[in-house]
Image: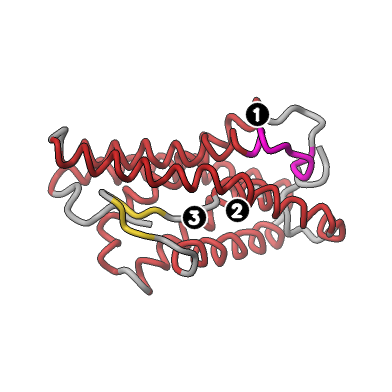
Amino acid sequence: MHIEPGIVTGAKIVLSYATAAGAVAYSGKLIWENLVARGALSLIGRGAIATLATIIFFELLPHMAVGVSEVHLIMGSTLLLMLGTAPAAIGLALGLLLQGLLFSPFDLPQYGMNLTTLLVPLLGLHAVTKTLIAKGTAYVDLTYKQALAMSVTYQGGIVAWVAFWAFYGQGFGAENTASVLSFGAAYMTVILLEPLVDLGVLAGAKALRGLEKSGLVSDRLYAA
């Protein structure tokens, strides 16, 4: 996952440090709450799973450069549903960092932008989940309509942030606008595919009720 190098340069890149710091600060609040509620072992275990999954999503699943960024199967809603928001935030942040350190060092200068692009939509999804999923509904019982709404919220947020960084860095010229539009159009495939993946993963989790007591899944996965 990366905004193409050179999209935002010079003093403008300072904004990405501020937005990333804000996203990390709010994520830290959720992480602390999760730590108090479920303990360190559960949080560390779920965070490690999310980190490994993120690296797999970024490096092993199909991905391609389109316009101003890359199109990935990030599966942010899947991480949130299965593991919880706090572990998902840990996994996305660490997975993105490890990707830069181990595979794509040219991405590191854009880490603040990329981190913002991944975390802010996740935090937005966390906020709207209370509206999308009624009280009394366990995640394993979600419908396709609910899963699609979650995917649109998360992936739409990613597209919006990528567009923001591109226009912020390069302006509204015809070439840049075309690159942003091509990226957004390509990302529609992810928005359509992710709900099916979510429902498949949730169906598998529903068949494995033993996970409920493992401490390695979201507390909303089985219990409303």
- Residue 7: x and y in percent read 19, 49
Label 2 secondary element: helix
Segment colored magenta: 138-147
Q: Amino acid at mark 1?
A: Leu
Check disc 2 and report the residue beneath it.
87
Alpha carbons under labels 3 and 1: distance apart: 22 Å
Q: Overall secondary structure of the magenta stretch? A: helix
Q: As shown in the figure, which amino acid type bears the numbered disc 3?
A: Leu
Label 3 neighbour load within 10 Å: few <14, some 14-19, many 20+: many
> Which of marks 2 and 1 precedes in the sequence?
2
Q: Is the Cβ of the residue at disc 2 closer than 8 Å to that at disc 3?
A: no
* Residue 66 image position (x, y, % from top left): 30, 52
Q: Are marks 3 and 1 in contact (CB under 8 Å)?
A: no
Q: Which secondary structure, mark 3?
A: loop
> Is 22 a magenta residue?
no
Q: Amino acid at mark 2?
A: Pro
Q: Which residue is mark 3?
A: 73
Q: Nearer the viewer, mark 1 or mark 2?
A: 1
Secondary structure category for the residue under label 1: helix
Q: Is residue 41 left or right of residue 22?
A: right
Tag 1 residue: 132
